[in-house]
Image (spheres, rainbow, N blue to C red):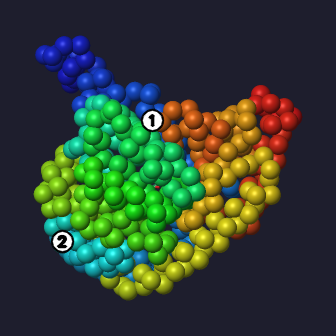
């Protein structure tokens, strides 16, 4: 059998041996080259299945908190007969009863009351962000982000060749006071991407004053806000979307952190005409989010134990975050970016001259995994930083793992970055 080659000319030729027919440079999605650091997310996904004892690399919920009995009950029901709804294709927008449950049970708890046609079920919230960026961003368009921010979001913006304007943070969140200055002389941004609650990677929650400033800026400039509320369930702080329903805002959420990332269910809330455009784009990639996954989420939402589950998550994750914060404070060579308010993460700086990447191999030998800081920034400014995901680690593991990390840092710092003594 022949294969079509598009590599060097517009007219394809049939050649006799297998090879990828389309050159990466011909992709319509920007420069899919090493610049995008494709290995970072790949490494992260690989680390998700690692058996390393101290896995601080991946931001996942603790599987021990999964409502396993509820899942068993739901799956038994779903598999009890070969229903077309469970095993067939389903609407791209998401099954109606799933969207209803997401709206009435989940989004309502975040203070949102969208119409049903304003809710799109996605394969994780990252898909929602990707679809939106694909729709709105052309090469060179400005996208505003917090600095540091979620590496997965930066990965998408880079892939679409956005001009990324990063706004520094402090312990109160994005320095919204700097927005006019940082954007002066630049084209109007396509949107501003922000995680107001329990930000990844810093754990910071945007203060009320900063929120107000951001809202005032968005209203005055007309720049849409893309609000990622992945960790919002860990806090009583409502999302911007709930507090300011008239803002131009697209809201993203996910069941990856409250339930399970492998289930791949998230949602976008936006005006119905925008949702229709996102639906058209989603059809280009996956037709619809896995029906079974959608129905598992719906079943869980309908069973009625969401509040108990959320309360348990809040108590467990907050205890782990506090333990990690206290433990780090005991090691003078490790500095926290700021006190984390919520979430799964700590962003930690190493002593000067030491890069997180320098430690990675040696750390892995000690079953210690962490995410290096670079991918959370637009340039090399976070080389000296690491993100520690502590959500899925029990308290004793956090204490021992961070102690091991501190010892390793001590040994490297004593020798310079060339290696441990
Ligand atoms: C802020 C934020 N948004 C989105 C995601 C990805 O979520 P999903 O698994 O729903 O694509 C993550 C995962 O780490 C995250 O931290």
Left of 227 or right of it: where is 146?
A: right
Point out the frontmost of discs 2 and 1: 2
Q: Is residue 12 above or below residue 415?
A: above
Question: Residue 114 location in percent, x, y?
Answer: 22, 71
Mark 2, secondary structure of its residue = helix
Q: CA distance from mark 2 to mark 1?
A: 36 Å
Q: On residue 420, which mark appears?
A: none
Res 28 → quadrant? top left
Q: Of marks 2 and 1, which one's residue comes earlier in the chain?
A: 1
Is residue 52 among the parts visible in the rendering?
no
* Residue appearing at x 78%, y 43% in the figure: 409
Is the shortest distance between ligand 1 and the CB of mark 2 under 8 Å? no
Residue 187: which quarter of the image? top left
Image quadrant, ligand 1: bottom left
What residue sits right under mark 2 in the picture? Answer: 116
With respect to residue 385, does 226 lie above or below?
below
**Residue 343 in sight from this viewpoint:** yes
Which residue is at a point 69% across and 56% down the rendered structure image? Answer: 53
| Rendering coords of residue 180 (x, y %) | 38, 44
Quadrant holding the C terminus: top right
Q: Residues within 10 Å of mark 2 (few under 14, many from 20)?
A: some
Q: Considering only vertical position in the picture, is 138 above or below 398?
A: above
Residue in the picture at 30% in, 73% down: 112
Q: Is residue 49 above or below residue 1?
A: below
User: Which SS class for mark 1?
Assistant: helix
**Coordinates of residue 186 in the picture (x, y in percent):** 32, 34
Check contact, mark 2 vs mark 1: CB within 8 A.
Answer: no
Q: Which residue is mark 1?
A: 38
């Amino acid at each position: 059998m022949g294969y079509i080659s598009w590599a060097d000319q517009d007219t394809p030729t049939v050649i006799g041996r297998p090879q990828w027919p389309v050159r990466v440079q011909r992709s319509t999605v920007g420069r899919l080259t090493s610049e995008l650091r494709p290995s970072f997310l790949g490494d992260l996904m690989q680390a998700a299945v690692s058996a390393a004892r101290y896995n601080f690399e991946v931001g996942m919920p603790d599987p021990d908190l999964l409502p396993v009995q509820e899942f068993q009950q739901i799956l038994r029901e779903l598999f009890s007969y070969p229903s077309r709804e469970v095993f067939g294709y389903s609407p791209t927008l998401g099954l109606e009863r799933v969207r209803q449950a997401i709206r009435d049970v989940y989004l309502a708890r975040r203070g949102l009351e969208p119409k049903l046609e304003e809710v799109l079920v996605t394969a994780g919230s990252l898909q929602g962000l990707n679809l939106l960026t694909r729709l709105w961003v052309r090469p060179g368009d400005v996208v505003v982000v917090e600095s540091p921010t979620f590496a997965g979001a930066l990965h998408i913006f880079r892939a679409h060749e956005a001009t990324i304007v990063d706004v520094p943070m402090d312990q109160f969140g994005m320095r919204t006071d700097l927005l006019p200055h940082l954007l002066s002389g630049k084209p109007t941004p396509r949107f501003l991407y922000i995680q107001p609650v329990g930000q990844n990677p810093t754990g910071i929650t945007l203060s009320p004053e900063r929120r107000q400033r951001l809202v005032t800026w968005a209203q005055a400039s007309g720049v849409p806000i893309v609000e990622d509320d992945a960790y919002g369930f860990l806090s009583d702080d409502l999302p911007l979307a709930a507090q300011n329903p008239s803002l131009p805002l697209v809201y993203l959420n996910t069941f990856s952190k409250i339930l399970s990332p492998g289930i791949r269910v998230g949602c976008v809330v936006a005006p119905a005409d925008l949702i229709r455009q996102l639906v058209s784009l989603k059809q280009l990639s996956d037709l619809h989010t896995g029906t079974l996954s959608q129905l598992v989420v719906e079943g869980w939402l309908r069973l009625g134990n969401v509040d108990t589950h959320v309360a348990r998550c809040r108590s467990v994750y907050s205890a782990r975050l506090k333990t990690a914060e206290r433990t780090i404070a005991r090691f003078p060579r490790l500095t926290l970016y700021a006190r984390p308010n919520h979430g799964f993460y700590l962003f930690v700086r190493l002593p000067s001259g030491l890069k997180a990447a320098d430690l990675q191999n040696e750390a892995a030998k000690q079953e210690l995994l962490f995410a290096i800081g670079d991918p959370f920034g637009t340039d090399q400014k976070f080389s000296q930083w690491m993100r520690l995901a502590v959500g899925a680690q029990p308290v004793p593991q956090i204490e021992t793992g961070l102690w091991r990390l501190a010892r390793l840092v001590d040994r490297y710092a004593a020798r310079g970055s060339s290696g441990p003594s």
